[in-house]
Amino acid sequence: MSPASVAHAARRLRGAAAAGVAGVALFALRDRIPDPDAVWASVQRVNAGWLAVAVVAEGLSMRLFAGLLRRLLRSGGISLTRPRSVAVAYARNAVSSSLSAGPVLSVAFTIRELGRLGASKPLSVATLVLSAVYSTTTFAVLGVVALLGGDATRIPALIALAAVAAAVLALVRLRRRRGGRRSGASLRIRAARDAIRPTGRDRLVLAVLALANWLLDVACLAAVCAAAGVGLGPHTVLLGYVAGKIAATVAVIPGGLGVTELGMAATFVGAGVTGSMAAAVVALYRLISYWAVLAVGWIAWLLLRDGVRARLAAAGRWLLGVVGRHEDEAGVRPVG
């Protein structure tokens, strides 16, 4: 089978998986489709204080992801300032989450930005690969905790874990029979490890940053629940969060729009939340964690352009000149 055929089959599989997730969510919501007026009424009653906590939590989550990139680059000998790392983190997220070929374009964008700061291409690729490894691994841990923590999901989760373990063992044995030939993914990970040599302390810090990045995003969702007056336990919030993220991963739509919301809402409705309240929670959470972050990301993308920064600097100098002339005129004006 050619690479193009494999890619086409993968896209069809992802589309089918996304349709399946959406179908299950719609089935769960079939009798509780909320009325838009009821959803709006629920949104209007939110607690502004808890909503502010949600915004702060999401901002800290993005900042910690930027810290993950900085730590990896520092292990490779490149120093990146905190403001620049935050801008790159927001901008790459905006490219990845809003364009049809976003993940590929965000990789190219990040490699170019890091290259402008002095990072070699192997180091830039290593930074992206290892950040993905740490983020994926820590999210998998959260997913296992969420699935094993519920009575209804524990048995299916154990079966799925056993199936994954069996598949991994089969792949390892198959590779040994073929003489130890490595897959493309394993070769990229090995090359990343050659480009970046983190110490034991670095690995611990990287794991903590990746896990804290996810946990603060979960905290954003929990704060939105508190703002809307929805009393959900930590496990239910985590389960809804994991369901939404997994739905976004399998969806072919940028940002998992629609599928993410359905996955979260179905989880909360299944936990006993009314349809209007679940819709209000999901809408507010996505407004903060997706749309607001997306807007900030595109602003960061613009500010990272040399031409835009040059025009802003010129405008600033012009404004300072105007203010300075007014002050000079005021200073020489006769008194009385």
Image (cartoon, helix red, strand yellow):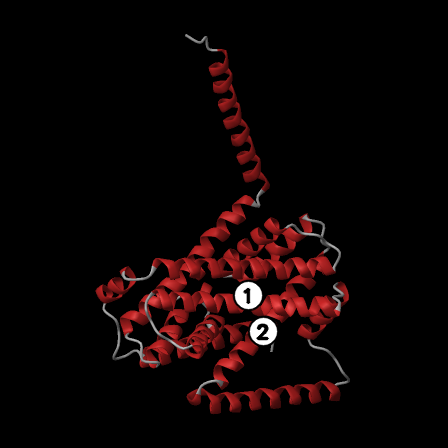
Name the residue nearer the viewer: 37 or 115: 37
Residue placed at 40% from the left, 79% from the top? 20
x and y, in percent, of residue 17 in the image: 45, 78
**Residue with the mark numbered 2:** 138
Quadrant containing the N terminus in the rendered view: bottom right
Question: Residues under labels 1 and 2: Cα distance?
Answer: 9 Å
Which numbered marker is on residue 213?
1
Quadrant containing the C terminus in the rendered view: top left
What amino acid is found at the position of numbered circle 1 in the picture?
Answer: Asn
x and y, in percent, of residue 181 in the image: 74, 80
Which numbered marker is on residue 60?
none
Name the residue nearer the viewer: 9 or 329: 329
Position of 197 relative to 13 (above/below): above
Q: Which image quarter: residue 270?
A: bottom left
User: Do callouts 1 and 2 mark residues in contact (Cβ within 8 Å)?
Assistant: yes
Number of numbered tags placed on the structure image: 2
What amino acid is found at the position of numbered circle 2 in the picture?
Answer: Thr
Question: Crowdedness of circle 2 by 10 Å Cα count: few (<14), some, many (20+)?
Answer: many
Residue placed at 47% from the left, 16% from the top? 330
